[in-house]
Image (tube, helix red, strand yellow):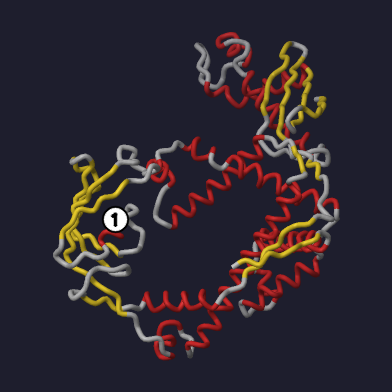
Amino acid sequence: MKYTTKAAEKSTVKITMTFTSEEWDAAINKAYLKLRGRFSVNGFRKGKAPRNVIEHAYGKGAFYEDALNLLFSEEYPKILDKKAKDFTVVGEPDVSVDDLNENGVVMSAVVPVKPEVKIEKYTGMKIRAYAYNVEDAEVDAEIERVRDRNARKVEVTDRAAQNGDIANIDFVGTVDGVKFDGGEAAGYELTLGSGTFIPGFEEQVVGMNVGESKDVNVKFPENYQAENLAGKDAVFAVKLNSLQGKELPELTDAFIKDATGSETVEEYKEKTKERLQKQADQRALNETENSILEAIAANATAEIPQAMIDAEIDNMVQKFEYQLMYQGLKLDDYLGFIKQTRAEFRKNYEEQAKKNVLSQLIISEIIKAEKIEATEEEVDAKIAEQAASVDKTAEEYKKTMDPRQVDYIRNDIIITKLFDFLKANNEMYVEESK
């Protein structure tokens, strides 16, 4: 077998394979030996008919398709191994038979490959960095959430409903005087101010007294999931059956210890501020790194094959599907709710997927150009750090590690070095944001 490779358009490579008549005949014979049991020929037990008899009965091409598949599946991986330094395949090949006769077979495969990315510059630029400082008000808000979670519900009879109350209501909704599906309930508990209902509904329940009935006038959003209601004016006949308020516990050291485990309010505040600052720092780091990549990508080009974009869309959809699973939902049910097909849903990710792939190509190219590596000492140090966090020695911890975990650590070190390099070699300016 002889082969040639040639760069083609849109980051593809055309591989042409030429097989001699002997190689082609041997492939047909392999296919015959593999498949002869499927053919029935008069005068022969099933699976015992000679190849020429089967070909006479079923046609000369009876084994061609399988013979072609055998040739391709045997030789294609070998070619990729030999050409690994020249190109990296990133998707499935588009295979065709260019010629087939008594002299042999010519097959070709057009394969998408990792494209070359052209980066105009990645140093000497002015790039925005991000920083977020946690304010005392954010800490106080966290404490109020702890109090709210531990609040005691109390029956309210001596005042009107207000935000934060739990209103037990009956309601019947109509559009143009006609009831609609899902617009009626009895004894429904609604936390006022939660934003659970259509905009304007909860605001009009605020101020009602227990036992009072009133018409609540609202308008469904233009993008409402039920198309027959989207943008329509509606009237809900609402009755307030009962009302519960929240009695917040007093903020004392004893309460905080019982609710959070911290000894004092001040200790909990310090721990909370530290936790929130770590989250803020991580957010700032992520946004700064994205800012760097966006600045580089603005002056970078690459002919990205659709296969790479599709693979990234697969990843993004899968992540979203996992998020739905944690909420007890299935993607198909969600798509039914938003009235989109899978193809339409995937299309939503197209542009972001292109940006993600270009960022990945930029990262790979700079790492290669700057020869950024993770030494074994650095990897071992990171493993030892992780081992210490779970009270194990490095050797003990290594025995429990999957090789992919080590690869992840190595890659994480390389990426950290990359962004340290980019920050050091560009003018980073900070606009502090809350």
Question: Which of the 4 image quadrants contains residue 284?
Answer: bottom right
Residue 75 visible in the shown view: no
Q: In which quarter of the image is the C terminus?
A: bottom right
Q: In the rendered view, tell whether residue 67 sits above or below residue 136.
A: above
Q: In this view, does 46 lie to the left or right of 278?
A: left
Question: Which of the 4 image quadrants contains residue 422?
Answer: bottom right
Residue 358 placed where, x, y %?
Answer: 71, 44
Badge 1, how many Cα within 10 Å: few under 14, some, many 20+? many
Q: Quadrant of the N terminus?
A: top right
| Amino acid, disc 1 | Phe
Question: Which of the 4 image quadrants contains residue 27?
Answer: top right
- Asked whether 189 or 409 is in front, the reply is 189
Residue 181 placed where, x, y %?
Answer: 23, 44
Q: Is residue 414 left or right of residue 351?
A: right
Q: In the rendered view, tell whether residue 324 sits above or below residue 63.
A: below
Which residue is labeled 1 in the image? 201
- Asked whether 281 or 215 is in front, the reply is 215
> Which residue shows up at 42% across the image and 77% down it?
144
> Which residue shows up at 56% across the image and 78% down it?
273
Q: Is residue 320 left or right of residue 159?
A: right
The residue at the far left in this view is 211
Q: In the rendered view, tell whether residue 71 sits above or below residue 434.
A: above
Residue 46 placed where, x, y %?
Answer: 51, 20
> Which residue shows up at 45% across the image and 36% down it?
341
> Which residue shows up at 61% across the image and 77% down it?
390
Residue 26 visible in the shown view: yes
Q: In the rendered view, tell whether residue 72 sits above or below residue 231.
A: above
